[in-house]
Image (cartoon, grey):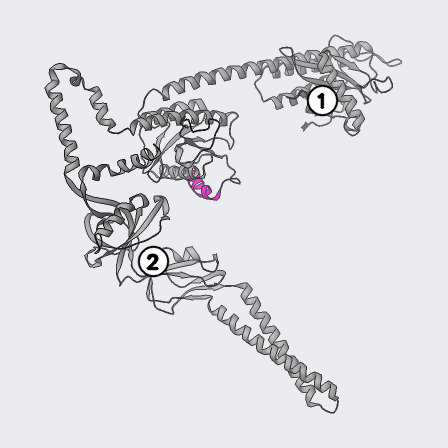
């Protein structure tokens, strides 16, 4: 609820209502005609301002504030209030000027009577004058509990009441003056009604335009089944519909989201830094399964999304970013609940990104428009993707466009073409070929040692750098543990106190003349107890000193530090017990490949490994030398599958290599490898993934 500053009734001459001459008090001199004319001019100016205000397109709350303030000023009243009708039929105080809270809100009985009065005015629709302190002594439930004359008028749109204007006028005016107040307020209520009616018409016009644009958008995005063309149509047409500065679209490709189209751009450089950051942001949001609406404040942004979001905003300078996952429409099937709205990460086909470059705010109604566009965009993209993924679609499309297939004189050519196709099929079944399964991995030394922290603490110093060679016992990291230091200091203090007490007892025992036998016995027992305490403290100090020595993390084996930026990574960072600090390898020893084989291909690898006891052959290529091929042999296959990075469920395979044949040995170099799994027919080699998909996702459910 908004409030306005107080209006000083003495600073204005009480203006005459429209068509009413102000009365002259008895015994007073006649009022200056010039002052009367000046007051009328001020009223006319305020009425013109209210009339102009009712013809503008300003927010509703701002109109109520400016409207009521001018009406109160024009009537030179003590205050006023504007009440609006809520959806449940009740009244809500929208704006007020000098509302007499002592008489209306502080006393529940007065508040109830006043509320009934407003409801009666709203129900009847008739303007009303209510004298001060009315309705209480006459048995009427509704009444005016204030000391002001209440001037009430209802404003409506299409005969539907929308609210009540209430003016708190000073009492004492004659009946003619009071009726003038009422007529003036009725005219102002009509202006408020005109404003609401115009606003409603504008909203209807905007809704009509929105639906026309939406209909055109739906028609255009569903015109074709080409994925790229559909993507560009979505981003360019939805920008006008959403009313934003830029719209982008990403699709799921391989391990993450890839930017496919940006509004206003005919071509797209997917290697550009801004495009790469946008793809990483869309991938993070899609993995979270919830839309992202960012308008400058990142308090509610999850940590896994905050970093790619800030990186993209720093690059694009966008003030508002919305990322909405596009879910594939659910397929209608007898076993599916039509009321179910559950969505899984597998049905996400892409994301719609909306950006604003202006103020840090989401425009009114934009959320609904974005959600509507996302829904229809997902349907159009799903249809285009399904069409594009049909088996041998390029071939069928070419055959469909070829007229010679349907012409009788070309029948021999058709027969020859059919025979050629049959020959190809027979060859794919009978001709053998090498069956190789691709996997990605990295090159690394076979002997690797992870350095862990033995205690909780803060890294105070790092003694090594990247690629530095170390020997056993060399210090790597200096840690600091304040709690351990406090415990050692406490034990040292306790030990000093115990020793001082021991010396005091020993001095007392030497003076036999002043001590009796009982006191000698007591001191002897206390001396024995203090010696045991001192021994216990010494043992604890030894343990704590050993812990303190572990704050210096040392190398256990010779090797080379391969952790990149180890100083920036660890310095001044708090660590917990068991955290990996760095990796040390032995580059002079054996090297190996560590491949990540997708779990769905492990059946072929396992069967081939059983038939080849000496190990499967592997051909691999280093990313640093893509033109050279090298050989290796599988030495170990892990028995468990793990979620490894973006590859999903994968199984680690270790491959022994001859490091002398490699042109360069660099730890963690990316490799692309092919594991040789024997020979199979060429058709199975080419289409084995398709056959497995049919077996698992089609035939299994029959």
Residue indicated by mark 1: 81
Query: What residue occupies the far right of the structure in this picture?
Result: 27
Q: Residue at x 85, y 18 (%)?
A: 139
Q: Residue at x 17, y 35 (%)?
A: 428
Q: Which residues are magenta?
A: 295-317
- The answer to whether residue 252 of the structure is visible from this angle is yes
Residue indicated by mark 2: 562
Left or right of 474 on screen, residue 86: right
- The answer to whether residue 10 of the structure is visible from this angle is no
Q: Nearer the viewer, residue 215 or 297?
A: 215
Mark 2 / mark 1, whichever is N-terminal: 1
Query: Dividing the image into 4 quarters, which one contains the C terminus?
Result: top left
Left or right of 492 on screen, residue 616: left
Q: Is residue 607 above or below residue 554?
A: above
Q: Residue at x 18, y 40 (%)?
A: 681
Q: Position of residue 418 (x, y in %)?
A: 14, 25
Q: In which image quadrant can residue 344 be found? A: top left
Q: Nearer the viewer, residue 463 or 510?
A: 510
């Amino acid at each position: 609820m908004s409030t306005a500053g107080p209006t000083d009734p003495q600073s204005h001459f009480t203006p005459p209502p429209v068509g009413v001459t102000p009365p002259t008090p008895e015994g007073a001199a006649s009022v200056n005609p010039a002052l009367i004319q000046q007051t009328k001019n001020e009223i006319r100016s305020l009425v013109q301002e209210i009339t102009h205000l009712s013809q503008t397109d300003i927010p509703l709350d701002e109109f109520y504030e400016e409207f009521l303030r001018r009406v109160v000023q024009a009537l030179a009243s003590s205050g006023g209030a504007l009440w609006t009708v809520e959806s449940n039929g009740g009244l809500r105080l929208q704006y007020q000027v000098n509302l007499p809270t002592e008489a209306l809100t502080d006393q529940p009985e007065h508040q109830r009577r006043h509320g009934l009065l407003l409801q009666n005015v709203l129900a009847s629709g008739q303007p009303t004058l209510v004298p001060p302190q009315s309705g209480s002594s006459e048995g009427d439930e509704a009444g005016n509990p204030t000391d002001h004359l209440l001037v009430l008028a209802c404003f409506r749109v299409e005969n539907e009441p929308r609210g009540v204007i209430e003016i708190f006028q000073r009492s004492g005016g004659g009946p003619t003056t009071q009726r003038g107040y009422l007529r003036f307020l009725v005219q102002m209520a009509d202006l408020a009604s005109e404003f609401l009616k115009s606003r409603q018409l504008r909203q209807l016009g905007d809704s009509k335009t929105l639906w026309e644009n939406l209909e055109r958008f739906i028609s255009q995005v569903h015109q074709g089944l080409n994925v790229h063309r559909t993507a560009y149509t979505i981003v360019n047409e939805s920008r006008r519909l959403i009313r934003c500065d830029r719209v982008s679209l990403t699709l799921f490709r391989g391990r993450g989201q890839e930017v496919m189209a940006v509004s206003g751009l005919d071509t797209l450089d997917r290697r550009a830094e801004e495009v790469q950051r946008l793809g990483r942001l869309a991938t993070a949001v899609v993995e979270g399964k919830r839309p992202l609406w960012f308008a400058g404040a990142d308090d509610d942004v999850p940590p896994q999304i905050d970093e790619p979001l800030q990186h993209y905003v720093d690059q694009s300078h966008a003030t508002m970013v919305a990322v909405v996952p596009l879910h594939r429409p659910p397929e209608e099937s007898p076993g599916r609940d039509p009321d179910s709205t559950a969505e899984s990460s597998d049905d996400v086909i892409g994301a719609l990104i909306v950006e604003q470059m202006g103020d840090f705010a989401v425009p009114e109604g934009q959320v609904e428009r974005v959600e509507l566009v996302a829904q229809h965009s997902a349907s159009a993209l799903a249809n285009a993707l399904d069409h594009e993924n049909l088996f041998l679609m390029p071939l069928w499309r070419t055959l469909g466009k070829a007229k010679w297939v349907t012409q009788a004189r070309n029948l021999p050519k058709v027969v020859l073409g059919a025979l050629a196709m049959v020959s190809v099929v027979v060859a794919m079944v009978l001709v053998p070929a090498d069956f190789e399964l691709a996997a990605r991995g990295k090159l690394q030394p076979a002997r690797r040692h992870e350095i862990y922290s033995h205690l909780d603490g803060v890294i105070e110093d790092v003694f090594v750098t990247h690629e530095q060679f170390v020997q056993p016992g060399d210090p790597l990291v200096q840690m600091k543990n304040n709690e351990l230091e406090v415990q050692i200091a406490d034990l040292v203090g306790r030990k000093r106190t115990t020793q001082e007490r021991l010396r005091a007892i020993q001095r007392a025992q030497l003076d036999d003349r002043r001590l009796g036998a009982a006191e000698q016995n007591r001191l002897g027992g206390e001396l024995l107890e203090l010696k045991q305490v001192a021994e216990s403290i010494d043992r604890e100090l030894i343990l704590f000193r050993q812990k303190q020595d572990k704050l210096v993390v040392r190398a256990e084996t010779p090797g080379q530090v391969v952790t990149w930026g180890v100083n920036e990574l660890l310095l001044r960072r708090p660590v917990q017990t068991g955290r990996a600090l760095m990796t040390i390898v032995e580059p002079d020893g054996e090297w190996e490949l560590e491949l990540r084989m997708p779990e769905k291909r492990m059946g072929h690898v396992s069967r081939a490994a059983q038939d080849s006891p000496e190990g499967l052959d592997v051909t691999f290529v280093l990313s640093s030398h893509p033109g050279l091929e090298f050989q290796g042999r599988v030495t170990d296959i892990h028995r468990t599958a793990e979620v490894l990075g973006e590859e999903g469920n994968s199984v680690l395979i270790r491959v022994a290599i001859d490091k002398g044949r490699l042109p360069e040995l660099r730890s963690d170099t990316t490799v692309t490898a092919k594991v040789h799994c024997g020979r199979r027919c060429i058709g199975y080699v080419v289409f084995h993934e398709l056959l497995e998909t049919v077996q698992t996702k089609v035939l299994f459910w029959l």
